[in-house]
Image (spheres, rainbow, N blue to C red):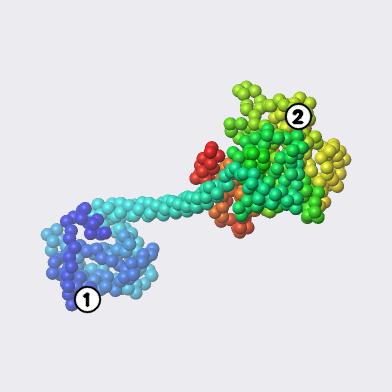
Amino acid sequence: MYLALLTTVVETEKLHIETDLSIEKGILELISELGIRKLVMGAAADKRYSKNMNIKSKKAISVLRQAPAYCHIWFICKQHLIYTKEGTWDANGAELRSSPQQVSPNTETEQSNHLTSKSNILERKNLPNPALESQIADADLMVKELEQKITSSEELLQNYKKERDELQIERDNSLKEAEELRHIPQFSEFSFSEIEEATQNFNPSLKIGEGGYGNIYKGLLGHRQVAIKVLSSHSSQGPAEYQQEVGVLSKMRHRNLITLIGACPETWTLIYEYLPNGSLEDRLNCRDNSPPLSWQTRIRIATELCSVLIFLHTSKPHCIVHADLKPANILLDANFVSKLSDFGISHQLSQNEGSSICWRTVPKGTIPYMDPEFLTSGELTPKSDVYSFGIILLRLLTGRPAFGITKEVQYALDKGNLKILLDPLAGDWPFVQAEQLVHLALRCCDMNRKSRPDLASEVGRVLESMRASCGGSSCFRGEEVMQDPHIAADGYTYEAEAIRGWLDSGHDTSPMTHHKLAHYNLVPNKALRSAIQEWLQH
């Protein structure tokens, strides 16, 4: 580096000399042979610089003592001038006879301080060339700038690596989710003979229920257990309800919608996925001595029902109103995941520009769950489902029958006796959350539909946050088609609002693995969102 610096000031070259002499004697011989008058030499063998240091190198001390008087020597360390031996020559270059300065490696402290002070003065006055000092300063600055650039480059590299890892996680999760979407069963048509074979000619022992449409049988199609709903000859329902059910469920897919596997058009028979835990009505009544649902499960079911209603009400190009929401039409799978069923009297509504979504029809449904305004005016709107949802939420909270439940709950609330009204079979309800849900349910049941809350912006937010705080992993994945999927530090993809509610409530662990999260950053899963949107459009 010094050769490069000196080249900008004087003509220089690197000289290699082989000799049997020691280094110091070799240097002294060169000074004599070449008549070197100016020499820069290192002052420390270990190249360690310290303030007020003396010459440490034995070779440097030897050269200092034995160098000709005419040779002017600067002893340096780490670009700092340590000591200067002044040369003595006249204007014609002849050597003057004056004693050179002598230094011993064991110099006393007082002499060391004197030499150091003198060195500092010479450092300012006796440099061989001012341009050299400037070049050295520029080199120092360049080194510092390069070090800063290296540090910045390392930080940038770490950020790129982190971004690469996040994208890899996003890609892997997207491929997994897309693969799951590809395996959603498609709607099929079956012959009546296949239905007879699946139900063993409608064996009474396979009958698992009945409703307004007809009897329901448990059957086997291929290697899959199914539920087969057969239209009764005495039913008030018929082809219209069959067409409506097929029209909705054959085109819609949602985790909390029952899957319509197929149908038999010649007998208006419907084939669904088989759900072993029956209906929510059965579970609230502990039918067949089944264990009661915990309050955590009830909150999850309410959240799932709210989610699927938002999905139906915001579907394109037509809004779908169920019009017959009740616990008997909410079925539960083996993991007690809820599935909304029975769309026979549902309606697909279109919103005209400048008008609200509304359908005028003869009121049908189950009286205690029906919107009072729908009963009196015949106008069916999405807020009619909101009323029914409010009644179901009150039933989940109290376990009481639907008739008169709003008045009963409001009375208990006014008297401060709400705690007594909560269903004890559900376990120890967190009272603050339960009271919040009661107020929310009563708002849903308001006689004036305009006063009822919006499911997406109000009800859903409260329920999602509450479900997240309960700590169940089912609160996050697989329960619904995600609207805004995000990847958390555990590598799993969640609905953004649900995972944010989980983190905002003070959790620092993964809802899936229960291990501590490395960080709380969320990365949008754009690939999955794109795949979901493409799937929904088809």
In the rendered image, is residue 295 in sight?
Answer: no
- Toward the viewer: 202 or 151? 202
Residue at (63% x, 48% y) in the render: 194
Real-space Cα distance between discs 2 and 1? 114 Å
Which type of secondary structure does the marked residue at label 1 adopt? loop
In this rendering, the label closer to the viewer, 2 or 1: 2
Q: Is residue 110 left or right of residue 442?
A: left
Which type of secondary structure does the marked residue at label 2 adopt? loop
Q: Is residue 375 left or right of residue 219?
A: right
Residue at (76% x, 42% y) in the render: 211
Q: Residue furthest top?
A: 354
Residue at (17% x, 73% y) in the render: 18
Q: Is residue 203 left or right of residue 117?
A: right
- Toward the viewer: 8 or 391? 391
Q: Measured from the top left, where is residue 342 in percent x and y? A: 70, 40
Which amino acid lies under the numbered mark 1 shown in the image of this protein? Ser
- Please name the residue that numbered disc 1 is placed on: 22
Q: Quadrant of residue 452?
A: top right
Q: Measured from the top left, where is residue 314 in percent x and y? A: 62, 34
Q: Quadrant of residue 90?
A: bottom left
Which amino acid lies under the numbered mark 2 shown in the image of this protein? Pro
Q: Measured from the top left, where is residue 424 in percent x and y? A: 82, 51
- Please name the residue that numbered disc 2 is placed on: 363
363 w.r.t. 427: above or below = above
